[in-house]
Image (cartoon, rainbow, N blue to C red):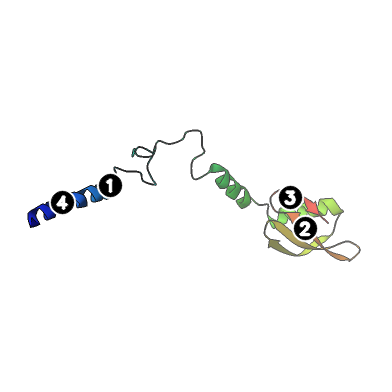
């Protein structure tokens, strides 16, 4: 009698434990697998840009190519018709030049450090 009960509990335990064992061995559904237990596609998608997107790299290189303070001063001198630079600072992508005009007035003039465009 006790052998029959032990055999029955062994069969019930095996029947209940089989789905758990199948998932543990990758036989069932898994979050990284498709509906039928097949591995998800690992082939590259050639229509997508690579992970280190080249646009980001090009933007960083563009930011690295800024004009010099001397070139910014030359552009201001040409835009305002004379004067001299008495101070300069770089704030992000913009030079702020302290400019003394021929009539001795002083003004801060902004110059885009990448394009060289002068803003008054």
Of residues 96 and 72, the one nearer the viewer is 96
Q: Name the N-terminal-most of marks 2 and 3.
A: 2
What separation in Å lies between label 2 and label 3 (alpha carbons)? 10 Å
The residue indicated by pointer 4 is 8
Please say if the residues under marks 3 and 1 sit with CB atoms less than 8 Å apart. Answer: no
Residue at image point 84% right, 64% down: 107
Question: Which quarter of the figure is the C terminus placed in?
Answer: bottom right
Kindly state the secondary structure of the residue where label 3 is placed. Answer: loop
Q: Name the N-terminal-most of marks 2 and 4.
A: 4
Residue at image point 84% right, 51% down: 79
Q: Name the N-terminal-most of marks 3 and 4.
A: 4
Answer few, some or many: residues within 10 Å of disc 1's Cα (few below 14, many 20 plus, some between 14 and 19): few
Mark carried by residue 116? 3
Instruction: Report the number of numbered marks.
Output: 4
What separation in Å lies between label 3 and label 4 (alpha carbons)? 87 Å
Answer few, some or many: residues within 10 Å of disc 4's Cα (few below 14, many 20 plus, some between 14 and 19): few
Of residues 28 and 89, the one nearer the viewer is 28
Answer few, some or many: residues within 10 Å of disc 3's Cα (few below 14, many 20 plus, some between 14 and 19): some
Q: Disc 1 or disc 4, which is closer to the eye?
A: 4
What separation in Å lies between label 3 and label 1 (alpha carbons)? 69 Å
Q: Name the N-terminal-most of marks 2 and 1.
A: 1
- In the image: residue 53, left or right of residue 11: right
The residue indicated by pointer 2 is 110
Q: Disc 3 or disc 1, which is closer to the eye?
A: 1
Residue at image point 46% right, 35% down: 45
What separation in Å lies between label 2 and label 4 (alpha carbons)? 88 Å
Q: Position of residue 14 (x, y in %)?
A: 20, 49
Q: Disc 2 or disc 4, which is closer to the eye?
A: 4
């Amino acid at each position: 009698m006790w052998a029959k009960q032990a055999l029955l509990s062994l069969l019930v335990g095996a029947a209940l434990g089989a789905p758990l064992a199948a998932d543990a061995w990758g036989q069932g559904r898994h979050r990284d697998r498709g509906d039928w237990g097949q591995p998800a596609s690992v082939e590259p998608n050639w229509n997508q840009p690579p992970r280190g997107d080249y646009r980001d790299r090009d933007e960083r290189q563009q930011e690295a190519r800024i004009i010099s303070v001397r070139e910014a001063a030359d552009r201001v001198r040409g835009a305002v018709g004379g004067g001299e630079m008495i101070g300069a600072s770089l704030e992000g992508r913009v030079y702020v030049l302290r400019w003394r005009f021929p009539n001795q007035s002083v003004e801060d003039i902004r110059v885009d450090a990448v394009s060289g465009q002068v803003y008054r």
